[in-house]
Image (cartoon, rainbow, N blue to C red):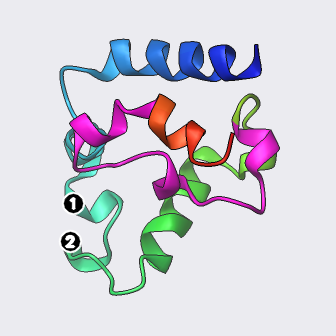
Amino acid sequence: MFKKLLVAVFGIGIAFGAAASIADNHADMGGCESCHADGEPSQDMVHELQQCHDCHGELADMGEPHVHHDGMLECTDCHAPHDQEAATDAEAACESCH
């Protein structure tokens, strides 16, 4: 049942965001700099992941399914900001652990 709930939650998010990638939506708000320092990706992605937390909060504060993954996953383990097709494969991402 939990797996079906996860897929449903991801599916809802995908349905609303299917027209544009996460990166496109964020770039519309403030350019590449809204996620990347000086508009360029960092080597270790630490800056980008901190940007996720600064804007969206910590996983523990975000509700289902995020709260259960706090301390175990990073945003990019489930979300693929520049690759909408990869981001829509939520069930495969969940099955790697569940």
Q: In the rendered view, tell whether residue 85 sits above or below residue 31.
A: above
Q: Within the magenta stretch, is there residue 93?
A: no
Q: Distance between the residues labelled 1 and 2?
A: 5 Å
Mark 1 touching mark 2, by CB under 8 A?
Answer: yes
> How crowded is the residue under tag 1: few (<14 C-alpha within 10 Å), some, or many (20+)?
some
Q: Is 33 in front, or is 50?
A: 50
Query: Which amino acid does the dot numbered 1 rest on?
Result: Cys
Q: Quadrant of residue 31?
A: bottom left
Residue lying at the far bottom of the rendered structure: 43
Residue 32, which numbered label? 1
Q: In which quarter of the image is residue 84?
A: top left
For marks 1 and 2, the one nearer the N-term is: 1
Q: Within the magenta stretch, is there residue 85?
A: yes
Q: Is 85 in front, or is 58?
A: 85
**What's the residue at 81%, 47% (across, down)?**
60
**What's the residue at 51%, 66% (across, down)?**
49
**What's the residue at 50%, 78% (across, down)?**
46
Measuring from the top left, give residue 44's x and y in whole percent: 42, 84
Residue position for label 2: 39
Query: Which amino acid does the dot numbered 2 rest on?
Result: Gly
Image quarter hosting the C terminus = top right
> How crowded is the residue under tag 2: few (<14 C-alpha within 10 Å), some, or many (20+)?
few
Q: In which quarter of the image is residue 86?
A: top left
Q: Give the range drawn in magenta.
A: 66-90
Measuring from the top left, give residue 65's x and y in whole percent: 71, 32
Q: Is mark 1 on a helix, strand or loop?
A: helix
Q: What element carries label 2?
A: helix
In this rendering, position of residue 96 left or right of residue 90: right
Can you see residue 93?
Answer: yes
Q: Is 28 in front, or is 73?
A: 73
